[in-house]
Amino acid sequence: MTDKILLLPIIIPLVSGAMVLLFSNRFRRAIEMISLLAASLSLLVSIRLFKENLSFSLPWLGQGLEFSLKLYHFSWFILLAIASFGFLIILYSILFMRNKAYLNQFYSYFLLTISFASGAVLADNLLIMLFFWEGLLLTLFGMIAIGNKNAFKTAIKAFIIVGITDLCMMAGIILTGHLAGTLAISKISLSLNGLGALAFIFLMIGAISKAGSMPFHTWIPDAAIDAPLPFMALVPAAFEKLLGIYFLTRISLDMFQLSPGSWVSVMLMAIGAITIVLAVMMALIQKDYKRLLSYHAISQVGYMILGIGTAVPVGIVGGLFHMINNALYKSGLFLSGGCVEKQTGSTDLRELGGIGTRMPVTFICFIITAVSISGVPPFNGFFSKELVYDGALERGWIFYAAALIGSFFTAASFLKLGHAAFLGKISEKNKGVKEAPFLMLAPMIVVTLLCVIFGLYNQLPLRHLIQPVLGGIRMEGHDFSGFPGNMKLVLATVAVLIAALLNHIWGVKTKGSGLKAVDHIHHAPILSGIYDRAEKRYFDPYDMGLKIADLAAKIAFRCDRAVDWLYDGLAVKVTFAFTRQIRKAHTGSYSAYLAWSLIGAILVAVFLIYST
């Protein structure tokens, strides 16, 4: 096999994405066929590259820099995941996006996203990776901007937040290249001391921001409302987690030596734990299907960061397994939300209810993906979370407790979502609702089945995809597939899930509504005030930054007006008043002028005497 085949996963969607822009929306079928064909070819190439080890390089930009790509165990299964999700979601989009505006732009940005994501995964040079990474920033902006009337504002927000963190990553790349003497990822090996730790932190910021971690997350819930739904299923649900966690793993295991006793490890675990708890608590109170899912997309990345941050084999394997599991069930959940939106015209939970009998396939897929993300055995999320729990507990009970609290609120929020959307009394408006078309159901069914398979047969992804990433030395002979070995942790998980179910039953009984089943948590003392401030965006760094910038602008404006008044107002008035008095003093009297001259001469003489 020629090494040039590594260019195909980049070139096929890149050329097709550019081609789609040549067609206007009148040629909808041509746009759809080109996009589906490109996604299909990308998937076939990724399947062909599966389990291959290839390298490709050619001179680029001079100065000894090379356009270098490398395919090895970790990158080939991420590449396959990117191509697979791209194909399934394009298939789904053919019906969901029909009759939408900016169709050619949507598919163009979609295909370019696949191209840039593939390039970022294959890149073996930090500068090349940065090129594709920044390309994703442009397509992110474009895919959000073509949404509803408020989408452009959200696109600007996403561009600024991600752009700032990308600047941090640029600084990290420069510093890493300086310390290592090379930009080749496979040749970098640095310690986490001094400037090495600073380089790691800069690179880490870029990685966790791409993954959607706190505090770089606040554009995601806004995009859930404003951007086209397939974008949410593709980017925040799948691609961003795959790319961000892929890069975080590479810098933690390959480029730097992350050890369990390091302060960097503790920092990563703290970020993961905080992201888990705070994001899931915000998900708990949402009243919109997509917005609730968006906060879970943020919360779940916390488990991945926590697992990798433990720097112990069981935690890292759990974090990576959770990465692929999350991409499956989170995409499935967003696709179920898209089916609900397409068939009912709304994702507002206050307008839904009782549609489970009208949309049975969507409801079943929702149930399976919801119990998967909640960590219910024997589905995939249960096994990856148990591994993360094990690693977290090995490093400190506080991190394990945060992860377990996250599981309680995850289960509680999905019980609320499922009850509010699919159960209860159906409204008059939705009595005519029917199941979504098969073309939209098929991708959702596929990812739902994989949630079951990756749970019941978790040895398939763990032994053949995840564990080999760490290598035999790091694995120390362990095999984490099969049923979890720590039964105490399993029992604790089951207890938490039962507690979440009892909490929901009690909430429904006291409030009389699935939607209000967690209102006792929302309006609890202390939490109520925190939630109120959170909903008013007091904790949104972007909005706070805008308010600070607005205040600074007002202060600067006042200072500018004050300076103008000083020079154009006060100084002029003083000058005119002074000159007016001088004019009055000039009476034409020679005796007066002689007196002024004598007084001036005396003053000069006194000054000269005392100065010497």
Image: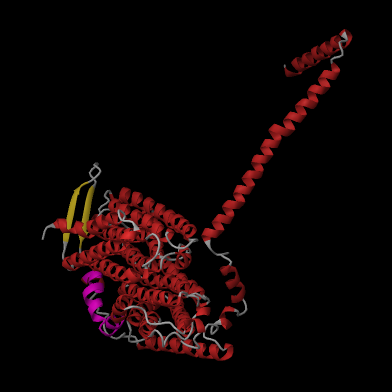
Q: Nearer the viewer, residue 296 or 196?
A: 296
Instruction: Point out the image quarter for the N terminus.
Output: bottom left
Above or below, 297 relative to 428: above
Above or below, 517 relative to 467: below
| x and y, in percent, of residue 487 in the image | 35, 88
| x and y, in percent, of residue 110 in the image | 33, 61
608 left or right, relative to 421: right
Q: Which of 281 and 385 is in front in this view?
A: 281
Find out whether residue 469 is within the magenta segment.
yes
Q: Which of 315 and 80 is in front in this view?
A: 80
| x and y, in percent, of residue 284 in the image | 50, 77
| x and y, in percent, of residue 492 in the image | 42, 87
Instruction: Point out the image quarter for the C terminus.
Output: top right
For the magenta stretch, what is the residue range? 451-471
Q: Quadrant of residue 579?
A: top right
529 left or right, relative to 232: right
- The main secondary structure of the magenta stretch is helix
Q: Which residue lies furthest to the front in this view?
A: 26
Find out whether residue 185 is within the magenta segment.
no
Name which residue lies at 29% across and 81% down. 449
